[in-house]
Image (spheres, coloured by chain):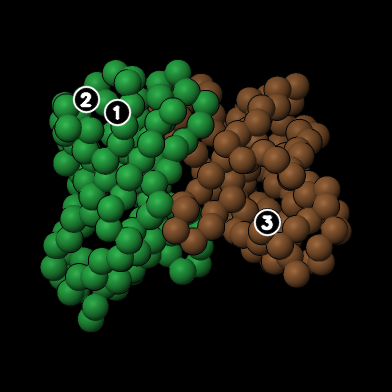
Chain colours: A green, B brown
Amino acid sequence: AQTVTQSQPEMSVQEAETVTLSCTYDTSENNYYLFWYKQPPSRQMILVIRQEAYKQQNATENRFSVNFQKAAKSFSLKISDSQLGDTAMYFCAFMKYSGNQFYFGTGTSLTVIP
Amino acid sequence: DADVTQTPRNRITKTGKRIMLECSQTKGHDRMYWYRQDPGLGLRLIYYSFDVKDINKGEISDGYSVSRQAQAKFSLSLESAIPNQTALYFCATSDSDRFSYEQYFGPGTRLTVT
């Protein structure tokens, strides 16, 4: 079975600063996908960014970028120029290429302080 | 209009009652999923379906059943609700034809069993 670990239950960051959320995973698979989802207080799950394991280049989406270290099985999310709207729970998720389900981490609650 | 809808959005029920949560999607996706979210545990998969005739148990299926009435509809039932089934329930969809396998989530149903 795959496991996804988010070791930071809560984090805070000053508005306009940069913050990094950690995620590690355990798998014997070589090909897989990794995702970061955001859950604001509205509780809607929103995809932030995804990474294919075969791609060496780190994914970026505007202010969001990842640091994907395949050998270390690490997939951290960096949020630059933090905004108040970034306040949310963030979940890391893993899926095998041949897989049929996501494996989610336990989440990191991020608060952006004005 | 939302692509993935869930009804009801909130529900309070008593121990022993049968309850059904419904999910509909207009995205045309073939795959549908039910998750539950508990504080500190992230999202865990209850059941998933890859087409109308395909139903599979997830990580925590005990006490739950599902029905895939059509490609667009996937219902979750609690035959005899118990208090530890109090949680936030999410329906999600994905498209097997899309390489990314991204999952799209409904708005969630907050269920309280008293």
Pair 1/3: label in front: 3
Tell me residue B107's x, y (percent): 58, 57
Residue B109 makes an appearance in the image: no
Q: Quadrant of residue A85?
A: bottom left
On the rendered structure, is B109 left or right of A40?
Answer: right
Crowdedness near tag 2: few (<14), some (14–19) or many (≥20) residues, C-alpha within 10 Å:
few
Name the residue tied to disc 2: A55
Label 1 marks a residue whose chain is A
Amino acid type at circle 3 is Gln
Tell me residue B108's x, y (percent): 60, 57
Label 3 marks a residue whose chain is B
Name the residue tied to disc 3: B85
Q: Which mark is residue B36?
A: none
Real-space Cα distance between discs 1 and 2?
6 Å
Q: Secondary structure at mark 2?
A: loop
Does B64 sit above or below residue A56?
A: below
Tell me residue A74's x, y (percent): 21, 38
Q: Looking at the picture, do discs 2 and 3 lie on one chain?
A: no
Q: Secondary structure at mark 3?
A: helix
Please name whichever residue, A104 or A88, is drawn nearer the observer in this view of the structure: A104
Q: Quadrant of residue A21?
A: bottom left
Real-space Cα distance between discs 1 and 3?
34 Å
Assign the C terminus of chain B to one quadrant of the image: bottom right
